[in-house]
Image (tube, rainbow, N blue to C red):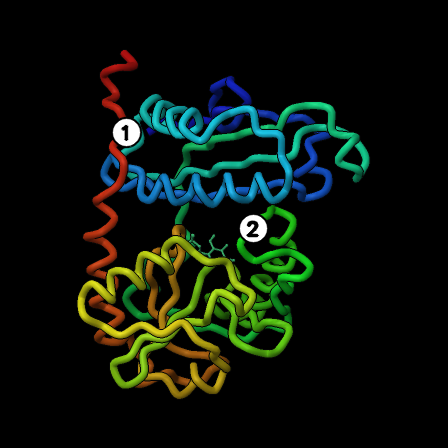
Amino acid sequence: MTKLVWLNGVVSPLESATTSVADHAHLYGDGLFEGIRIYSGKVFKLDEHLDRLYHGCRYMNFAMEISKSELKEIILQTASQAEAVDGYIRLNVSRGSGLGLDPKAVKTAPNVMVMISTLALYGAEAYETGLDVITTSFRTIPADSLDQRLKCIGRYATHILAKAEANRAGAGEGLMLNHQGLVAECTGDNIFLVKDGVIKTPHASCGLLQGITRDTVIEIARRNGLVVEETLLTRYDLLEADETFLTGTAAEVIPMVTLDQRLIGDGRPGRLTKKIIDWYHEETLKGTPIPAYASNH
Ligand SMILES: Cc1ncc(COP(=O)(O)O)c(C=O)c1O
């Protein structure tokens, strides 16, 4: 695979792609993004990621000139040109370029980027042994400031600070509570627990990104006859759980085995967690096929 970037219509190698220094996401975080995985030559949940992105564009009032179906085609063609089999797509849309906070200062169409690359969040061993997680001191941004459904670039400054705090504590991830002290999510993943055979995850209103992996796991678990509740959870619930795990496009499904240095269950990846990991891997093979590379030669 060759790492490629499609940027406003021009395809370049990843190392040489450049954008305007006046890009509003670069200057103010005024942009949206998606991270999407490619498994075995197929893009997983492509329509769902595009739907989230375009809902965000409408909310942010970005003057997108590229339609959803055009962007889908651009993504598939760029992935084909990169000869991607397994990889990670980073999709960025900013309001456009212009100096000054005022959206009226932005005189260009949105800057749109499709990056075909790779990404591994945690080492392979963590998927076998599970992650240690700490509760960070950073709360998620309340919906009355920035709706959690927006995968807004600016939001991530908080998450990066939370991740750095987890790093300093030697933990693999940082748990973020919402402004009421309820469990929201981790820095780049949603969180689930299993208690007495029932799967629970914080309700979407608890200040979290409504992850596409989260939705997929809920759907797969229910399809397999398990009960899933979207509810209000506290740290107490996590510490009392039999199993916990995290989900995200980049993270996939990964066991969490301690919180604040206290074991969850027996401190090993749980039985249902392992089943869900297997089911999730089967599901990832159902993506949108990338057109054959041969068409580029
Ligand atoms: C803060 C946050 N929560 C949750 C997720 C998981 O979302 P998804 O499953 O759509 O990748 C992400 C993914 O990037 C994230 O950044």
Q: Does any portion of residue 103 appear in the rendered image?
A: yes
The picture places residue 75, in percent across and down from the top left corner, at 40, 29
Q: State left or right for residue 248 relative to residue 63.
A: left
Which residue is denoted by mark 1 in the rendering? 290
Which quadrant does the N terminus fall into? top left
Closer mark to the observer between disc 1 and disc 2: 2
Where residue 86 sits, quadrant-wise, is top left
Label 1, secondary structure: give it.
Answer: loop
Label 2, secondary structure: give it.
Answer: loop
Q: Residue 277 or 94: which is nearer the viewer?
A: 94
Where residue 197 sits, quadrant-wise, is bottom left
Q: Which amino acid does label 2 sit on?
A: Leu
Q: What residue type is labelled 1?
A: Ile
The picture places residue 29, in percent across and down from the top left corner, at 67, 44
Tell me which residue sits at (51%, 18%) in the image.
Answer: 9
Where residue 59 sits, quadrant-wise, is top right
Which residue is denoted by mark 2 in the rendering? 150
Tell me which residue sits at (27%, 36%) in the image.
Answer: 288
Q: For the residues marked 1 and 2, what is the alpha-carbon distance in whole angstroms?
A: 27 Å
Residue 5, compared with residue 140, is above or below; it is above
Q: Residue 174 or 147: which is nearer the viewer?
A: 147
Q: Residues within 10 Å of mark 2 (few under 14, many from 20)?
A: many
